Amino acid sequence: MSAVNIWEKMLNIDRRWIFLGIGVVSIVPFFINFGMPVRTTREVESIYDYVDELGSDNAIFISFDFAPGTSAENMPMAVAVMRHAFYNDIPVFMTANYPLHHGMMLAAMEYVFNPTTEGFYEDVDFEDWKDLREAGVTGKYELIEAWENQGNQLPEGALGWVFEGRDYAALGYAPVFNLVILGMTVSIETQYPVDAHGNSTGEMPMLQEHKSLREVDMALTSSGSGACVWWVTYAREKMGLPIAFGLTAVMATDYFPYLQAGQVIGQMGGLRGAAEYEVLLTENGITPSTDKAFRGMDVQSAAHILIILLIIMGNIAFFAGGFHKKTLLKGGR
Amino acid sequence: MKRTVPLMIVMVGGILMMLQYFIPHQISQTVFAYYTDWTPIIVAFALVLGVGSLTRIHSHKIRRKAKNWQYSYAVLIPLFGMPILAHLWPESISGGMDSPSIFHFIFMHIQVPIQATMFSLLAFYIASAAFRAFRAKSALATVLLLAAVVVMLGQVPIGELLGRWLPETGLWILRYPNLAAKRAIMLGVGFGILATSLKIIFGVERNWLGGAGK
Amino acid sequence: MRKNWIVVPALMILLLLPALSVAQSVDEILTPAAEVQLEQPDPGLDVPGTITVLDRKNDAGDLLVVSFEQPLYTDGIFAYNVYRRVAGESDAEAWNLVEIIPADEPPEFIDGYDPEYPINSGVLYEYRIASVNIDGEEFFGPVFEAGTVSVGEIYHTGKTRVLIAGGLFIFLIFYYFAKAQRGAKMYLRPIAGIEAIDEAIGRATEMGKPILYVPGLSSIADVATIASLTILGRVAKKIAVYQTPLIVPNRDPIVFTVAEEVVKQAYLEAGRPDAYDPDSVFFLTTSQFAFVAGVNGMMMREKPATNFYLGMFWAESLLLAETGSLSGAIQIAGTDAVTQLPFFITTCDYTLIGEELYAASAYLGQEPKQIGALKGQDACKGIIMGFITVALIFGIIDVVANTHILDWLRDLVTSPIME
C-alpha cells in the first residue's frame, strides 16, 4: 500500500468511525465527572442580574418554545430561571407555543416540584389553598404563614412553598401563539380563561395583579425555533416588555443582532448558556448545586476536542497526501 | 375567476395591512383584530385537510399493498391513537397531559426520547460534516478553519483551561465579524422579502397560487 | 410591574425623618414651616391638587395621559389611588380604581391599559385621586372633569421615517419594474445553484428515480415559503414534461394545500395533467423532528436522485442534507436562515444563499417584471450601503475630533424601537 493510499483512506474514512468516536466521547464523561469550570459571560449575567432585581411585586413569563428534540439544551435554561424566580418569590407565568411544547412545560414543573430533585420546591395546588384565597389571604408571606398555621410543614430538602395561582400559573399552549402574545398585551385572561389544569385564571391573585403583559417585567423564551422572535415583535416592540432569549447553540449566533440592538436583555446560548446560569445560581446560594447543563459541559468539551482532532487529522492527510495540488476532492461519501 | 378572486383578496388584504401599520385609529385596530380572529380558524380547517391527506395517502398504500406499506400502519395507528387516548383518560382539560394518564406516559417515554434522539443525531452529523468541510484549501478557507477551531474551543470549559484568550477571542469573533457578515445577509434577505411581498401583493408573482406564472 | 420595590426603603426613610427631626429640634430653633408641620394635629392626609388629563397622541382613542399636582405635605402618604368614572354619573359605585401610584413615583400615568376598565373613544370622564396611608385609609381630593376626550388618530406621526424609507424602497422596485417592462436590458449575475436545477432534474429522469422537494418547515406566513412555492411551480412544470416522479412532503397544513395546487397546476400547464400523482404532495406532521425522521426514511427507502431543500429551515437542515448526501443524491438547498447556511453549504452540491432564494423565481422565469424587481432590490441595497459608508466616516470623525455627528445621523434616520 503506497503512502498516498493511506492518506486517501484517511480522507475517505467511513463516517461510521466518526459516529462511533462521537458516541464514545459523549458517554464516557457521564461516568467520569471532570467538573471543568464554567466562566460566565455578560450575555447570561445580564439575565441573571435582571431577574435577581425582581421580587414578589413583579412577574415574569417563561415561554416553553421548544420541542422534546431540543430539550437537552432548552430545558435547563427554563428550569434555572424558574428556580431563580421561585427563590425570589417572583410569580411565573408559563406558556407554550405548540402542543408538544406544552408537554415540556409540564415536564419542567414536574422536575422542579419533584422531591427527588436537589433543591426542589413544594407545590400547593390551586384547589388546596382555596379557603385561604377566599378569606383574602393572597400575599406571599401571609399566605405561607397561614398555610403553615394550618398544620402544613415544608418537607425536608424543599427550598420553599410555591402556590399555584400565586407563584406560578401554567397557562400552557394556545393556538397561533404569535397572536396570543399580541392579545396578552391587552389582557392575559382573555387569551387564557383557564390554565392547563382547568383552573379559572380570573381567580388567580397573580393574574389579578398582572392583568396584561404591560404589568409583567420580563419574558424568557426558551426556544428551539424562530418563535423566540415573536416575543420581540409582538411584546417588546409593541409595549417594551424586556425579553430574554434562551436558544440552542446552533441558533445562538443568529440572534446576536437582537442583543446588540438592545432588543433583548440577554441570551443563553445552548448548553453552555444554561450551565452559566446554573453556576450563577449555585455561586449565589440560590440552588444547592449545579444541574444537568453543567454536567453536560464535560461531554461538550470532549466532543469539541474530538471534532478539532478530526479536522487536524483531515488537514494533515490533505496536505501530506498532496491533495491540495489537485482541484477537487469529494471524500467521505 | 378562479384566480382573480384570490388575487384580489391578496391585493386588498396586503394593502390594508400595509396601511394598518400607519393608522392607529380604532377602525384600523378593529380590522386588524378581525384578521387575527380569522387566522386560527383557517389554521384549524387546514389541519383537517392535512390529516385527511395523510390518511388518504397511507390508506391507499395499505390498500394497494405498495412498497413498504407496513410502515403506513405505524403512521395511522398513533395518528388516531394518541387523540383517542388523550380523551379516554383525560386527567384534566389539557387533554390528559398530567402524569397518571396513558397519554402522558407515551408522550414522556416514547415521543420525548424519540425526538431527542433525532436532534442528537446532529452531534454525529456535525462531526462528520466538519471533518469533510474544514480543509485549508485556500487562504480564506484557512481563516475559516482557524476561526472555527477558536470558537469551538472557546465555547467549552476546556478552552478556558488552555488560556483566557481563547473564549474571549471566540466571543469576539461571534460578536463582531460574525455579526457583520450576518447583517449583510440579513439586509439582502430583508429586501428580498420586501420585493417578493410586493410582487405577491400586486400580482406580479402568481406561481404560489398554482401554475408557473403568466 | 415594578411598582413597589422601592417603597419599602422609601417608607423607612419617611418614618425615620420625623424621629430625626424631633431629635434635632432639641438643639435647633424650629423654622416656621416645620413648626406648622409638627403642630398639625392629624386630621388626615393632605390631598392632591389639580388633575390634568390629556389625549395621548398616536393611539386608537383608548388612552389618556393623566397627571396631578402632588399635595404640599406628603408626610404619611404611602400611595395615590386614582379613580375614574364617566362624567355626569352620580352613582358612587361608578368610580373605578384605575391606578395605584406609589408616593415616590412621578404623579403621572397613562390610563386605559387596564383591560377591565378600558377608555372609550369620545367619552368624557372624570377623575378623583385619594392619598392613601400605610393602613390603606383613603383621603379624597376634589373631582375633576377631564378637559378632553380620547380621540383616535388617522396617522401615526412617529412612523414618518418608516413611511419615507418604505415609500422610497417601494418606489425603486416599481421604477425598475416599469423600466424592465419597457424592454431595458438588465444583466443578471449567474447563480450556479439555479443553473444546476435543470441538470438535476435531467439526472433524476435519466436514473429513473424520484425528485424530493422540501418547501421548508415554516408556515405560509414566511416569505421564504412563498418563494419556495413559486420555485416549486417552475420545477414541477419541468418535471411534468419529463414525467419524473416527484415527492413533496409538507410540515404545515396550509403550505400543503398550496403546494398541492401549485404542482397540480404546473402539470396542467405542462400539458400532462394525467401524469399528476395525487399522492406526490402530502402532509407529514407538524412536529419538527418527526418530520425529519419521515423525510430521512423516504430518502433511504426511495433513494431520490435529486433533493431540493428550499425555504425556511431550522436545526433539521443538517439532518436532512447529511442523510441526502449519504443516499447519494444531488442536493440543491436554499434558505434565508443564516444559521443553517453553513450546514447546507458543507453538505449540498449547490446552495442559494439568503436573497438568492428570492431571486430564483425571477431567474427561472426570466420575465421582465421579475428581473426588474431584482434590480430594484439592488438599488435599495445601494442606498443602505451608502448610509453605512457615511456612518463609518462619521464614526471615525467622532473618534478623531470628539464630535457626536454619528448620533445625529442615527437620530435622523432611525425610529425608536417601541411604539
Image (cartoon, coloured by chain):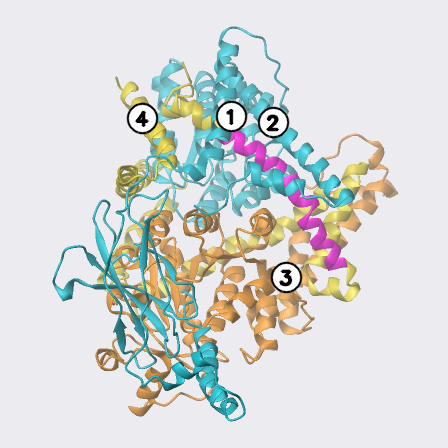
Chain colours: A orange, B yellow, C cyan
Q: In the rendered structure, which disc, 2 or 1, sits on the residue that comes first in sequence?
A: 1
Amino acid carrying mark 3 in the image: Arg
Task: Assign a secondary structure to mark 3.
Answer: helix
Whether residue B82 is situated above or below residue A329 in the rendered picture: below
Give me the disc on residue B12. 4
x then y, percent, for residue C79:
36, 72
Q: Amino acid at mark 4?
A: Val
Question: Which residue position is annotated with label 2?
Answer: C383
Find residue C32 and report its horizontal and vertical position in percent: 44, 80
The magenta stretch spans residue C93: no
Q: Of discs 4 and 1, which sits in the foreground?
A: 1
At 28% across and 90% down in the image, what residue appears?
A: A150
- Visible in this render: residue C204? no
Q: Which residues are magenta?
A: B166-193
Q: CA distance from mark 2 to mark 1?
A: 9 Å
What crowding class fits label 2: few (fewer than 14 Cα within 10 Å), some (14-19), or many (20 or more)? few
Q: Main secondary structure of the magenta part?
A: helix
Q: Are marks 4 and 1 on the same chain?
A: no
Q: Amino acid at mark 2?
A: Ile
Q: What is the quadrant of residue A330 in the picture?
A: top right
Classify mark 2: helix, strand or loop: helix
Q: Residues within 10 Å of mark 4 (few under 14, many from 20)?
A: some
Q: Is residue A315 left or right of residue C329?
A: right
Outermost residue on the top side: it is: C183
Give the foreground label among 2 and 4: 2
